[in-house]
Image (cartoon, rainbow, N blue to C red):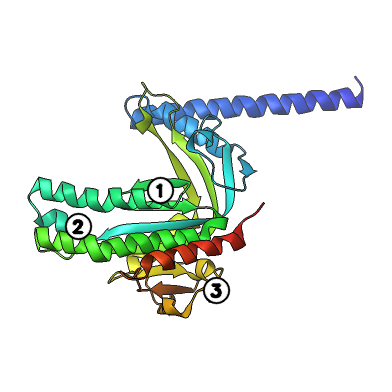
Amino acid sequence: MSFELLLVVIVLLIIFAVCEFSLFKKSKNIEALKNQFCKDIPTVISKELQIFREHISINEKSKIFVSPNIPIVNPNRWDKIPGIICCFVDMAGSTALSASVENDEKLAKIYRLFTETAIRIFNEFDSPYIDVKGDGVFALFNSDQAYTALAATISFKTFVYYYFTPKTMQATRKAVGGHFGIDQGDILVRKFGFKRAANRPDRQNEVWAGQPVNMAAKLSSLSSENQLWMSSRFFEGLDLEGLDSDFDWEIERKSLKHSGKSFSFDTAYVLCDNWSELHGRSHCQRLLALNEKLKTY
């Protein structure tokens, strides 16, 4: 037997031994899991651990795309989209509200007024993706929609200040407002769950992995008294010099070093202003017009 052939045989024997050991180890692991879990959970865990060990494919995308095109079938495929803007809005005081309001009808109306209005306002501003997280809502915008994202969040913030909070106060005698945060960064996305589960669409959902959604939610938790907190990497990418002096916005720069929360940036910008009752419409339109600078053809 030639040396080359002997070498091939040795390699094949090593591969066979490794495969046999892996199968033995997997079988042993499943048996251990069967003693720990009921139903078919051992198979579920074993399968997911196997996928965890496999290579992941990351596909670069330029924009957010419609939900049916987000990957779900191939467990090792993710899509990556750069510069995504996340606007996160959350009900302030909802825990105390739920604990103290015993009238189900009042509580249902309040939750609908906040959540449904947020969804519909973000939809009016052409957010490519909107989702509900607890009693909050997050909307995603592409990198060329930065001024739209800001205008949409200010619009909802204005609604909360002028309409939602007074209505809730009138109905419950409770001060319920909103938390608002915006961040921007790269994001990974895929769907998890079942492609088909007895025709139930609630068995799958998109997962947006990365910093923007988490950071926007954390920023919103710092807000009080109708403040909008924006990450430095979002706000410093805006050019607001083209706006008229009659905007007269008060924007404060804040250090996050002693915020008690972990951020991937050191500073944030805080906007307290809402759309005014006299000039709000025209100010919003002028802010949206700045998006022309960001369009890519």
Instruction: Find numbered disc 3 in the image and state the secondary structure of the residue it sits on.
Output: helix
Q: CA distance from mark 1 to mark 2?
A: 27 Å
Task: Give the labeled residue for mark 1.
Answer: 123
Residue nearer the viewer, 246 or 271: 246
Q: CA distance from mark 3 to mark 2?
A: 41 Å
Image point 49% across, 74% down: which residue? 266
Q: Position of residue 105 (x, y in %)?
A: 11, 46
Location of residue 156 (image quadrant): bottom left
Task: Give the labeled residue for mark 3.
Answer: 242
Q: Is residue 218 visible?
A: no
Location of residue 178 (image quadrant): bottom left
Residue nearer the viewer, 103 or 38: 103
Left or right: residue 277 compared with residue 62: left
Say which of marks 3 and 1 sits in front.
3
Quadrant for the N terminus, please: top right
Q: Residues within 10 Å of mark 2 (few under 14, many from 20)?
A: few
Image point 12% across, 50% down: which residue? 106
Numbered label attached to residue 95:
2
> Taking 235 as reference, is 13 above or below it?
above
Q: Earlier in the sequence, mark 3 or mark 2?
A: 2
